[in-house]
Structure formats: C-alpha cells, structure tokens
Image: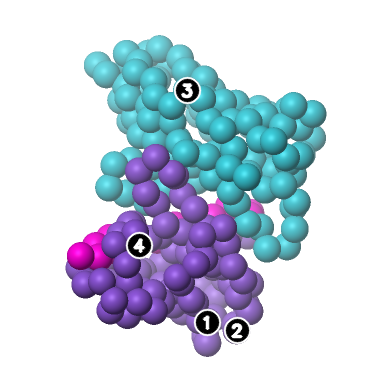
Chain colours: A purple, B cyan
Amino acid sequence: DAGITQSPRHKVTETGTPVTLRCHQTENHRYMYWYRQDPGHGLRLIHYSYGVKDTDKGEVSDGYSVSRSKTEDFLLTLESATSSQTSVYFCAIRLAGNEQFFGPGTRLTVL
Amino acid sequence: QQPVQSPQAVILREGEDAVINCSSSKALYSVHWYRQKHGEAPVFLMILLKGGEQKGHEKISASFNEKKQQSSLYLTASQLSYSGTYFCGTDPSGGSNYKLTFGKGTLLTVNP
C-alpha cells in the first residue's frame, strides 16, 4: 500500500515567520503534489514535482516554494507566513493507475 | 480553469439515488472523482478517460461525455457511508505531469 506521512499535522505560527511542511512517501513514486484546501475553493494545486530537483508551479504558487532533494521527501516552504495562508495542506502522490493518493493533511494556522 | 460542479449540496434519505455533475470549459483528457469525509483526506473513487467510457464501483458509477466536456457521478441506493464531499478533478492534456484541477465539491448528506 502507498504510504504518505505529513509533518507536522498541526501548526500554529505567527505572521512573518517561515514555515516548512514535510511530505514523506515510502514507495519511490516520481510525481508528488502540494495542495491547499479552503472552504468554498476545493483543492488548489500549489506546486508539484516530477522528479528529484524537478518542480513546477501550480495555480496558487505565490508565497510558496518547494524542494525535492530526495525521491521520498517533498518540502513546502512559506518564506514569510501570512494569515491568508491559513489552510489545510495536502500532499499527494501519483500512483501507477494515474490516480492521486493523498496524505493525511496538515492544518496550518497563521495568527 | 476550475471545473463547475452541480449541485453544490444534496440531501438524501438512505436508499435514494443522486447524480453529481462536473463541467469544464476546456477539452478534457480525463476526469477523476474523489470523496472526502469530514476531517479526512480525499479518497480516489474512479478515473474516466477520453472515449466516453462508463465505469462502476459497487453502486457508484460515472460517465464521461468528452464532446460536452462533462462527467456525471451516479450514486445508486445510497448508504449512510456515502456521505461526504465529492470532488471532480480534470486533466485537459493527458500530459506527463498529470496535474489535476479540482471543482469546489458537492456535499452529499445521506440521512437514515
């Protein structure tokens, strides 16, 4: 079974502080994605990766950066968190049948 | 551009049927359907590829009309466990990065 962990699961931070969210997979899948989910907006793609050190922007990438130095880890960084980045963040991997498998999510609150 | 889902919400009694629609302004290569229960991650239901095929998963099935750029999810004889928010995700290109654009979701509530 595909396995994804996200850390931390919950975080409260203050405006202006940097925040890094981690997504870890156990099965060597090439494609990984970061989404944010907000009421009334559904899931929106922030960034995605198609291999180690290969990343690209999604539809809501402003204020976010990503890195992937190892196949298993995909990091999402908020350089200077703002209240508008309060959200639930989901990481996903693409499985062999093209479906996406989602991690448990990280609830981030920016005060 | 985000696909449009309708209805936004629907309330059923156990055993009733429902249809959830997903429309895109772009030509589509594939449509994915996911269900999310409150406080949990979205879970994959099925994928439909260009070609108008219909798929089924127990009492949940879906169709894809590529000419109309629409997909519909059919829930038959609904069960309490079907409650949740349903999302469609669309892929216009079938490109190798497999990016999906999700609709805003349809909240389905099944009551006893």
Residue A52 position in % (x across, y down): 60, 82
* Mark 4–mark 1 CB contact (< 8 Å): no
Residue B7, which numbered label? 3
For mark 1, does the 10 Å Cα neighbourhood hold few (<14), some (14 to 19), or many (20 or more) residues? many
Q: CA distance from mark 4 to mark 2?
A: 24 Å
Element type at mark 4: helix
The answer to whether residue B43 is visible is no
Q: CA distance from mark 2 to mark 1?
A: 5 Å
* Mark 2–mark 1 CB contact (< 8 Å): yes
Q: Report the residue marked by disc 2.
A: A53
For mark 4, does the 10 Å Cα neighbourhood hold few (<14), some (14 to 19), or many (20 or more) residues? some
Asked if the stretch drawn in magenta spans residue A103, the answer is: yes
Query: Which chain contains the residue that carries disc 1?
Result: A
Residue A85, which numbered label? 4
- Residue under the point 50% across and 46% down: B44
| Image quadrant containing the C terminus of chain B | top left
- Residue under the point 43% across and 39% down: B35
The answer to whether residue A59 is visible is yes
Confirm whether circles 2 and 1 share one chain: yes
Compare marks 4 and 1 and give the one earlier in the sequence.
Answer: 1
Residue A110 position in % (x across, y down): 25, 65
Disc 3 marks a residue whose amino acid type is Pro
Q: Report the residue marked by disc 1.
A: A68
Compare marks 2 and 1 and give the one earlier in the sequence.
Answer: 2
Residue B89 position in % (x across, y down): 57, 44
- Outermost bottom residue: A69
Per the rendered image, the range of residues in magenta is: A97-111
